[in-house]
Amino acid sequence: MELPPGPRAPAAWQTIAWMARPAGFMRRVHAEFGDPATIRTFWTEQPMVLFSHPDAVRQVFGLDPAIAPAGQSWEFVRPFAGEHSILVLDGDEHLLERRLLQKPFHGERMRGFRPIVTELAQKEFAAWSGRVVTLERMRELTLEIMLRVIFGAQHGDELARLQAAIDATLEGVRSLPRVLAMALVRRDLGPRSPWGRFRVAVEHFDALLLDFLARRRHDPGRDSLLAHLFDQRDQHGDPVSDRHIRDQLVALLVGGHDSSAASLAWAFERLARHPAVRARLRDGDPAYLDAVVKEVLRARPALTIAPRLLLAPVEIAGRQLPAGVQVAACLWLALRREDLWPDASAFRPERWLDGSSHDSMSWIPFGGGVRRCAGAPFAEMEMREVLRAAAELSIRPVRPESERARRSMLVVVPDRGGEIFVG
């Protein structure tokens, strides 16, 4: 079967473009080859076919995981994510983990997290003055929020060490040169190699976290999410292991930390260039605040693709595709197609309040189907509360031109870190 057309540049060049300038790369591919298009990068070993039309996206999300497992597309994160991670599981195992992780992020329990988010955000913004690189500040804030929510405790020395270990581990896969080196050389060649340094950081993180879990198992804190995780039972009715909980915590920390920090940095990058939006935010209208959050997630999504590895031939959007290739809903393109979003490149929260209808498969910043981000309700709540707390800040861009996108691990961030000037 012939794959859809795509760039003929070597995989190495496509990989660099995919990571250094992901938005521009996807935009050029779509403009030249249409939908679908095939790219070849070292991100996956197989060619990847990108789809962005809602009908095709719906088909991708509806594929049977027995023939199109999503977990196999994320094998490269297994060394950090762990064997029990929701990222690398499929089928019934994935659904079980999903149910366990979704439960705390709904209803009254999630609403109970709002005061924590507000308190920490207000504390953070009280110190802002002059030039601020918002990505750095949002990484620190969202990590502190997750540690407070998960562990139900104020920061002591123990949690500070855990925070430092998380930062050190993630920093190794945020650096573009290191990630490119890891993509090109997929082997651990010793402690000084890219994979070797990453392995050492993960081992240090694991030692701290597993020691923490062993000591907290009998006293997890009544209101912490950790208490909920300790109450879980496996398929035999026995308490889940600390290693299993470790993998769940990593999924929560990574999903609720880097992606949320990226989305909030984009929010400040956009708001700094749109004073009319900031002025309307200060009016305190909850509907407009919700529209701003949705528009940030549409105009600058933190995630770019939701891939599946085909184990058998399938037909998507009238095209026969063979086994052994990756198919992906391209979130970035779906959220920025001109035929789906009038004036798609504009940051215009009002589009969410003018009565226009939007296909549910065209607004997919958290993915879709059974693999839609389990923490999406928490992420949206967190964005609303942080931006509400920041509404009175006087901000402006450091430079007039918009920031381009670059890849940082699994997410897309502003290339200058969402620079703003406060005051």
Image (cartoon, grey):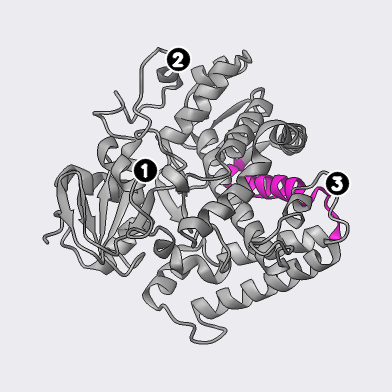
Rendered image quadrant of residue 202: bottom right
Q: Which residue is drawn at 88% across and 57% down?
A: 219
Point out the image quarter for the C terminus. Answer: top right
The residue at the far left in this view is 2
On screen, residue 340 versus residue 420, left or right, reads left
Q: Give the range drawn in magenta.
A: 132-157
| Residue at 79 percent of width and 51 percent of height | 227
Between 202 and 111, the residue placed more toward the observer is 111
Question: Which element is circle 2 on?
Answer: loop
Residue 353, numbered label: 2
| Gap in angstroms between the C-alphas marked 1 and 3 | 38 Å
Q: Are marks 1 and 3 in contact (CB under 8 Å)?
A: no
Q: Name the residue under label 3.
A: 222
Q: Which of 42 and 307 is in front in this view?
A: 307
- What x and y, as percent, mark residue 245? 69, 61
Give the mark nearest the N terminus, 1 or 3. Answer: 3
The percent coordinates of residue 269 (x first, y second) are 50, 36
Disc 1: which residue: 331
Query: In the picture shown, does residue 23 fall above or below 71?
Result: above
Residue type at mark 3: give it.
Answer: Arg
Q: Do the residues labelled 2 and 1 touch (CB within 8 Å)?
A: no
Which residue occupies the foreground of this view, 143 or 65?
Answer: 65
Residue 322 vertical placement versus 116 (above, below): below
Between disc 3 and disc 2, the foreground one is: 3
| N-terminal-most mark, 3 or 2 | 3
